[in-house]
Image (tube, rainbow, N blue to C red):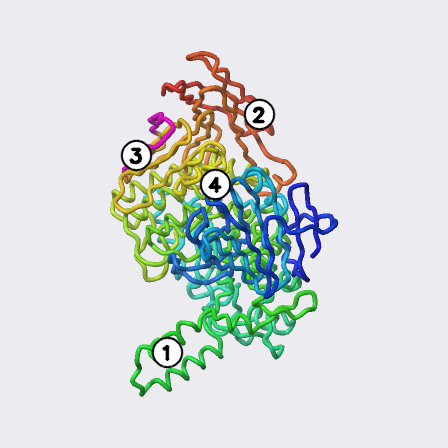
Amino acid sequence: MNFYELSDKVFKYSFGNPINTEAVVTKGEKVKNEALRYFNIDDTEGMRFTYKMTKEQVVWGLGENLKGMNKRGGIYDSFCSDDPRHTPDKKSLYGAHNFLVVDGKETFGVFIDYPGKVIFDIGFSEESSLIIAIEEKDVEVYIITGEKPLEIVREFLSIIGEGYAPPKWAFGYQQSRWSYPNEESVREVAKKFIENNIPCDAIYLDIDYMERFKDFTIDQKAFPEFKTFAKEMKDKGFRLIPIIDAGVKIEKDYDIYEEGLENNYFCQDEEGKAFMAAVWPGRCHFPDFLNPQVRTWFGLKYKVLTDLGIEGFWNDMNEPALFYTERGLKEAVSLAKVSENENLDIYSFFKLKDSFNNMSNSLEDYKSFYHNINGDKINHYKVHNLYGYNMTRAAGEGLNLIDSSKRFLLLSRASYIGMHRYGGIWTGDNHSWWEHLLLNIKMMPSLNMCGFLYIGADTGGFGGDTNHELITRWTQFSIFTPLFRNHAAMGTRKQEPFSFEEETIKNLRNTLELRYALIPYIYSEYMKSLKNKDMYFKPLSFEYTDDFSKRVENQLLLGASLMITPIYEENSLGRYVYLPEDMVLWKVKNYQERIYEILKGGHHYIDVGLNEVPIFLRKDKAFILGKHSKNVDSLNNEELKVIAFVENETTYVYYDDDGTTKDYKTGTHEEVIINIKKCGEDDFAIEIKNKGNTKVRVLNLEIIDTNGRVHKKILSVET
């Protein structure tokens, strides 16, 4: 074992000969070895790390995963998995995020940097035992010390590198469905947004825009003048976002296939031939994204679409998903033929059924192909969790070569820690279940802990049929997530905001208008979190130290100032909330009408109609509110509202930048610093500082005092 100090709070323990995942960008100084902190080690078979938990300790983290914010009582397989039915018994989802924080009398963080399967048994097998197991002895373990979870998270975010900043338009509402199969269907969707006065910034193109499901191709019958069509849509206010899949179709004269084969750019089987498995196009090869040359080659292919006016992409099926291989298909068909004339009892029937069900994403298949890593032949199973990460890295690096100054929208389904530097993620193919709305809520801070800020779920659910109430409540939550996309599967009920009865359309329109009015605050808090190595979403206990806050898993702190309490149960017209301190409640029907109520710290039941969004403003905090528009590009934020709840004093820093370039990396941005201090019963001293030549000209202040009175002031911002 080798021991490194990355800082006075971050320590790396390197066992065996670990693969460099490039998740961590900070290099440490090798020092004299010391025992692994907190954990006992059993290296009899693979590596097994055990920690004895006390009853009061909470375990946060593991990014995109099941169960609650507190991961105690569960067992989790860190192994990127294509499984859309996220039922409570499942152990893994699309991402592998091996960072957690143990929070209690003894508080610390641990990151297991291992690219294959890792099992986290957090009080499942033994109530008091946290057991982390991997099958091999080659792993790097990072221990982060600190007094509070948020302090530990910030240390972790510092060592994994700065995250991804999407273009500002990507904070607008985005509409998707598998599938809008041709130009006319997309035009019709855009037309209905415009006719119904519903804001929207992007329409997604699923696999049907391609020529026979081939990456970087256009179906000329469905989209005969794609470049002209993309411009037409952008002129109307909608950017087009096409899908890119991991599998490359095996087809003679298809340039991606021919080039990949000629240059040995595909993953290989045991015999050194290009590995074959089927996905959307049928039989495919899979680019070896762990090879830098392959990443450059594939990443530059995105230029085919950027030259046609495309400014954003979603990478899918990159766990990688495998529908079947020749091996699996032959075994299942062979068993079916043998069983054809048999009297199948319960065991033989399930054996036959499982042979077909288990064809997809088989571990045996994942163990049957290889990567070239620095000249070494490495079995895919050992590095499985790096595949989607490096596909999106290929895209991010390629887009940077295509236009180094421009921000592109980029999101991925599969991911590993480190991928946050290149793009965002959506939480995979969920379902139109209320349980998945609650899972969406609980997952957000866990993903922020692992560096992923640009996140969101398929609003309304991808699979199954939503109803008017679920789409409304889910939309009321999604207006707060940086990535805000409504996405549904072919064959399901249509769930675009204009697809329901008039009352629901009205409620959804009002909710979307609130989102656009909140974009100045959302974007400001996102970018400050990015630059300051902070979290956009936090559990209550990351800011409040009372014991009860640790128990709350259905409320979130959002940025510096707000707390949100989504409604996530069917037929609910209210909910219980816990306030760690006095807060202002604003139940939003129409954001231009504001009635505030002060609730004392403690437990409350609040009524929340289906047409209301509850927002809580914390004490001695403030937030910014603008005006909505049809899309982000047409927002005019020269005049903003500042809503503050002041007992003593508050300072809010409003951040903004051009939203399109990477100049923010060199410090080019705008700040308006607003300080409000209470001097007397009806007297407030207000100071406004302008840094960076802000576009804001007027601030309309609404200052709520502890008696619930609202003091209004209008101030000019000096340039």
Residue 179: % across, % down: 39, 60
Q: Is residue 302 visible?
A: no
Which mark sits nearer the N-terminus, 4 or 2?
Answer: 4
Disc 3/disc 4 C-alpha distance (Å): 23 Å
Residue 537's tag is: 4
Q: Is residue 4 visible?
A: yes
Q: Which residues are magenta?
A: 593-609
Contact, CB < 8 Å: mark 2 with mark 1? Answer: no
The relative height of residue 251 versus residue 587 in the rendered view (above or below) is below
The amino acid sitting under disc 3 is: Tyr
The amino acid sitting under disc 2 is: Asn
Residue 352's tag is: 1
Which mark sits nearer the N-terminus, 2 or 1?
Answer: 1
SS class, disc 2: strand
Please state if 137 lies on the left or on the right of 190 as rendered: right
Disc 3/disc 2 C-alpha distance (Å): 41 Å
Disc 4/disc 2 C-alpha distance (Å): 27 Å
The amino acid sitting under disc 1 is: Leu
Q: At x 55% / y 39%, what residue is drawn?
A: 534
Q: Quadrant of residue 323?
A: bottom left
Please state if 515 lies on the left or on the right of 672 as rendered: left
What residue did someone put label 2 on? 690
SS class, disc 3: strand
> Are there few (<14), some (14-19), or many (20+) residues within 10 Å of tag 4?
many
